[in-house]
């Protein structure tokens, strides 16, 4: 069965389609098939991923925020108290196995990339850091004398 037909046949395909995981769903199926998972297992894992997608969508997270730590949080904190609408998979072992195959498909942020500063406080601290670095860039690390207006 083609990957798009398999996805379309899921009871909760909209949970994946409306989540950040929609961009990697086809690759997820292809990954499992390349590893010779049975169609039954692939369908079970997709249902588990649909449940995870529903939870992620509720958190309003982007794809680049999905990582192993988030999966652990889902497995340990959400599944034991899950109140999501059925049908869903809440078995931790199946969910863990399904999501373990998902994480390698998520693009990771490149190391060494410049960190984006988002808050005014962060920008102010970095500006102050640059100010101090400029003020102390001379021959020694002497503190700037405190001027009391005398
Ligand atoms: Zn749930």
Image (cartoon, rainbow, N blue to C red):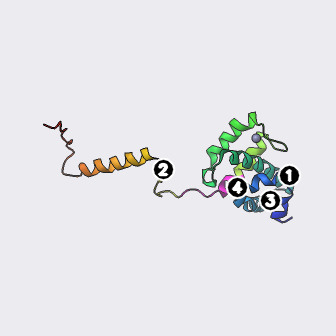
Q: Nearer the viewer, mark 2 or mark 4?
A: 2
Q: Tell me what residue is drawn at x 79 percent, y 61 percent.
A: 33
The label number, if any, that marks residue 118 in the structure image = 2
Instruction: Confirm or deny contact between disc 4 and disc 3 (CB under 8 A).
Output: no
Residue at the top extreme? 81
Q: Which residue is mark 4?
A: 21
Instruction: Confirm or deny contact between disc 2 and disc 1 (CB under 8 A).
Output: no
Image: magenta residue range: 101-109
In this orientation, which residue lies closer to the viewer: 42 or 16?
16
Q: Which residue is mark 1?
A: 11
Q: Nearer the viewer, mark 2 or mark 1?
A: 2
The label number, if any, that marks residue 36 in the structure image = 3
User: With respect to residue 87, does 103 lie above or below?
Assistant: below
Q: Tell me what residue is drawn at x 61 percent, y 58 percent.
A: 107
- The Cα–Cα distance between marks 1 and 3, rounded to whole angstroms, is 23 Å
Q: Tell me what residue is drawn at x 86 percent, y 52 percent.
A: 11
Decide if residue 131 is on the left or right side of residue 36.
left
The kind of secondary structure element at disc 2 is loop
């Amino acid at each position: 069965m083609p990957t798009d037909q398999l996805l379309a046949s899921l009871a909760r395909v909209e949970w994946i389609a409306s989540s950040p995981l929609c961009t990697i769903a086809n690759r997820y199926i292809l990954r499992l098939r390349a590893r010779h998972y049975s169609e039954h297992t692939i369908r079970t894992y997709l249902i588990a991923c649909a449940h995870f997608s529903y939870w992620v969508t509720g958190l309003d997270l982007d794809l680049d925020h999905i990582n192993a730590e988030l999966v652990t949080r889902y497995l340990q904190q959400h599944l034991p108290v899950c109140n999501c609408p059925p049908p869903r998979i809440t078995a931790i072992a199946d969910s863990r196995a399904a999501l373990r195959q998902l994480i390698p498909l998520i693009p990771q942020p490149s190391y060494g990339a410049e960190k984006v500063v988002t808050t005014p406080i962060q920008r102010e601290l970095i500006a102050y850091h640059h100010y101090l670095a400029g003020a102390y860039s001379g021959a020694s690390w002497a503190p700037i004398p405190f001027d009391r207006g005398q």
